[in-house]
Amino acid sequence: MAYKPARGSYEIDRIFRGLGRVRLRTGVYDKRLADRYEAMLEGLPIETVRLVLDDKIPLRAAFDAWSAGQAHTLPTMQGLRPLVATMKAWAKKPPEAVSDSETDNRDRLIARIEEIDAAACVADLPTIVKVIRRQLEGFGATFNRQRAAAMAFLRDDMGPRAALYLDLTEIPVRDEPPKYARHPCTVQEARVIARELGSKWGPVWWALCCHGLGPKEYWHDGWKPVQLGLEIFGQKWTARHRVVPLVVVPPAAPGTKAGFAEALERADLAVTPYDARRSYARWLDEIGAPDYLQDAFMGHGKNDMRSLYKWGDITAWLNEYGRKLRKHVGEKLLRVAK
């Protein structure tokens, strides 16, 4: 039972199973209320009591939630982990393989969370998703993808029965406009899109189209010009590390993948970032590149280019098909320092 010392409010001083001796000043002067505080500590999970004792959860906040039958909403040690760092670790090594587009979506969600509240903890995720829902009014498909990514994180991290996961399921999806069909652009269409995107994102779109770069490859995996080619350090599988004919020198990224994707969506151009890579595949076909070269330049298959062909052959390809591609898209040969 709570006791009243000579000075101050009632205190709790007793042995709790799994915690040992607990001494805690309640801050209240009503013995019945202090006794209820003690009963609450007896009924809460040990992990939650530890957070109360460490001042991670205010005693009164814990009592209000417990009294309202909402003790399950109180933070846990899992919930108090830093959100951005925890999500980055999850996105880097997902429990199951995910597509490039889903990887991009998860990265965009993390970047947006970092902009909203870089210091947030895992328990703040439902609140942040509500903020994102307001920010993305009119962009239903984008919000729904990011909501799904947040749910995937909590499902993998805490399980589908966790209170935070259930809180996320109660945040309603937004209406989506019809999805864009896959659109491999003609050269003229790609040029128009580049102009519409303006000086910031237009050159990025055009460079992706001209070299078959996926968004992840451009922003994260890495690339560099090499003589007549562009070496792309694709990580999806071995063949995605490849050398393709150099058409234009890609610009340094002027912003994030999320910013690029949202610029395309805002411009309502009926294409997605990955349609740039699809356009490149179309152009390779239009210039008459044989199937085995199309596969090599797209990074399809299991083996890397250098293990299948001699470097001399690759150099000849880069020269011949680089010339054909530049003519096809209307670009002049650019000299690259060796």
Image: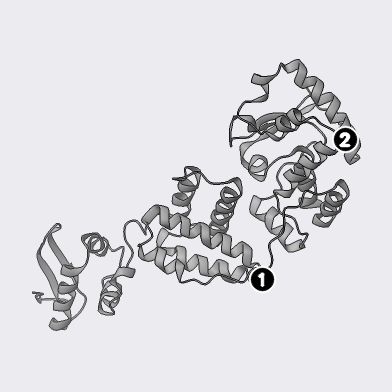
Rendering coords of residue 333 (x, y %)? 88, 31
Q: Do the residues labelled 1 and 2 touch (CB within 8 Å)?
A: no
- Nearer to me, 314 or 44: 314
Indicate the quadrant containing the C terminus: top left, top right, bottom left or bottom right.
Answer: top right
Rendering coords of residue 272 (x, y %)? 71, 54
Q: How crowded is mark 1: few (under 14 residues within 10 Å), some or many (20 or more)?
A: some
- Nearer to me, 291 or 96: 291
- Nearer to me, 222 or 318: 318
In the drawing, does residue 151 fall left or right of residue 142? left
- Label 2 belongs to which residue? 326
Rendering coords of residue 219 (x, y %)? 65, 43
Q: Quadrant of residue 282?
A: top right
Considering only vertical position in the picture, is 181 above or below 295? below
Q: In which quarter of the image is residue 162?
A: bottom left
Image point 21% across, 60% down: which residue? 46
Identify the disc placed on residue 10.
none
Q: How crowded is mark 2: few (under 14 residues within 10 Å), some or many (20 or more)?
A: some
Q: Give the structural element (helix, strand or loop) at label 1.
A: loop
Image point 57% across, 64% down: which residue? 144
Q: Going from the N terminus, do you reach mark 1 or mark 2 first?
A: 1
- Label 1 belongs to which residue? 138
Q: What kind of residue is marked 1? A: Gly
Indicate the quadrant containing the N terminus: top left, top right, bottom left or bottom right.
Answer: bottom left
In the drawing, does residue 130 fall left or right of residue 18? right
- Nearer to me, 70 or 166: 166
